[in-house]
Image (tube, rainbow, N blue to C red):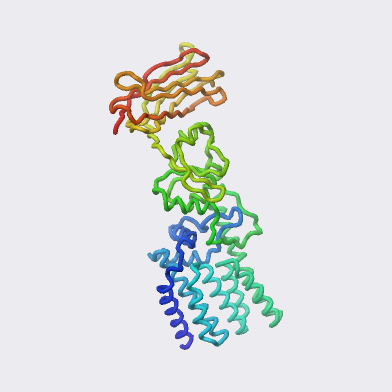
Amino acid sequence: MRSLSYFSGYVLIGALGALLLGNLYEPEANYALYRFAVNFAEGRGLLYGTPVGNVTTFPLAPALLAALVRLGVEPSLGSFLINAVASAFGALCLTLWLNKPHYGALYALLMLIQPSPMLTVMLALTLFGALMLWRAKPLIAGAGLGLAMLSAPYAAIFALILAFAAAGQSWSAWRRFVTPAAILPVGTGLIVQLAYALMHVALPLPDWTRLALYADLDEPPEAAQVGMWLTENTTPDALILANEAYLIGYYALPRPILDLDGKLMPLERDSFLMIRYAPDIVVLREGESVGWANFTTTYAQLHQVGALRVYGRVVNWSGLDDHGVDVNLSARFNRQDMRLVNVAIGRELRKGDLVRVRLDWQLRFAPRQTVEIKLNLLGADGIPVAGVIERLPPELWRTGAFSTYHAMLLPANTAEGTLRLFLGVDINAASLADLQVASVQCVP
């Protein structure tokens, strides 16, 4: 009964103290924990991030928070509840161990000035382990320290100290303490690794010796910070083209993401990359290029974290709507060497748009000379309002179904109304085509 009274008093200290010291909390410091808990509660994976490198997570505190999220508790409130209960439990263990209630009250107050449930849970379980070892229950003490190491890595230091204390009691006490203290984190590490391997078979796994995985919530990895920033500063449907997409994409859910590294999905990094996908956001490493000459005039840097730079488009991309055609561009009659089978361009274009055009080809043989593609948008008076000329080298072409992508800027002073798209194809100074392939509308 006395223990329950102490525990209730420490919970009350935590609740009242949080109201008085609430300005000391920084929710951003626990964003990684919140993100993991929400994803975990919605069945999107065991890990909040990726074990590539040195950063993943101990699952204990996030799993507790995820359980509260599943019950409908808002993540920041759930974090506070875990902090309050864990602080009170740690204070109770300290009081029972030292038999000094005012030490427990002081501990409960000190726990209010740090915002991480992972650290609070770790300290509470460490104090519980110390109490059990003091009461000559090394098996329970070892389990407590094993759980503590599943909450934060710093518990390993306390586990080592208590292991020496157990050895001072007896060989049997040391063995009964060390066994659960080692099995819990290592076994959980193996389970997490296995789950990760099964769910993300395309990603590289870390060294198998790194079974105790951790996260420093005060400084998440650069890619995680980029993902957090994108969550706060982009719309949920923003298309992201990024390196380290496995981690950025996790934090930026539900935003669709394209993987420049090719670890999550194959992505052809050719000269058509940017026009093909027309991303809203591009994340590149310092000094890296997407291989598109117009990138610097189409995208501006919005944010930077370490070596990662975030770029956002400053012009609107037009959509792609199919306009079926069937044009035989073969050099001889009765041949099907080169056919244009479709033209894709937005049916409605807005002034100032970066107009995308996709030409779908069927090639029996790839051209052996440079192919010159000329695209012109003509107004109702027959005067060109926008156009582009591109020379595509023979090594770019492939036999079978193949598409080329082109872009041109529609001026802001373009008159509203019908625009006609004309295509010209020249090979070796010989014109194979000069004809209208689509009709679209310029709208406000």
Residue at position x 52%, y 43% in the image? 259
Left or right: where does residue 327 sit relative to residue 97?
A: left
Residue at position x 53%, y 14% in the image? 428
Q: Nearer the viewer, residue 77 or 333?
A: 77
Residue 387: name its quadrant.
top left
- The image shows residue 36, relative to residue 394, as above or below, that is below
Give the mark count: 0
- The image shows residue 340, relative to residue 177, as above or below, that is above
Left or right: where does residue 130 sit relative to residue 358?
A: right
Residue at position x 46%, y 84% in the image? 4
Left or right: where does residue 128 sit relative to residue 237?
A: right
Left or right: where does residue 234 sit relative to residue 208?
A: left
Residue at position x 44%, y 26% in the image? 359
Residue 215 percent coordinates (x, y): 56, 61
Residue 318 percent coordinates (x, y): 38, 34
- The image shows residue 335, relative to residue 253, as above or below, that is above
Residue 408: name its quadrant.
top left
Residue 345 percent coordinates (x, y): 38, 29
- The image shows residue 130, relative to residue 419, as above or below, that is below
Residue 294 percent coordinates (x, y): 48, 33
The C terminus: image quadrant: top left
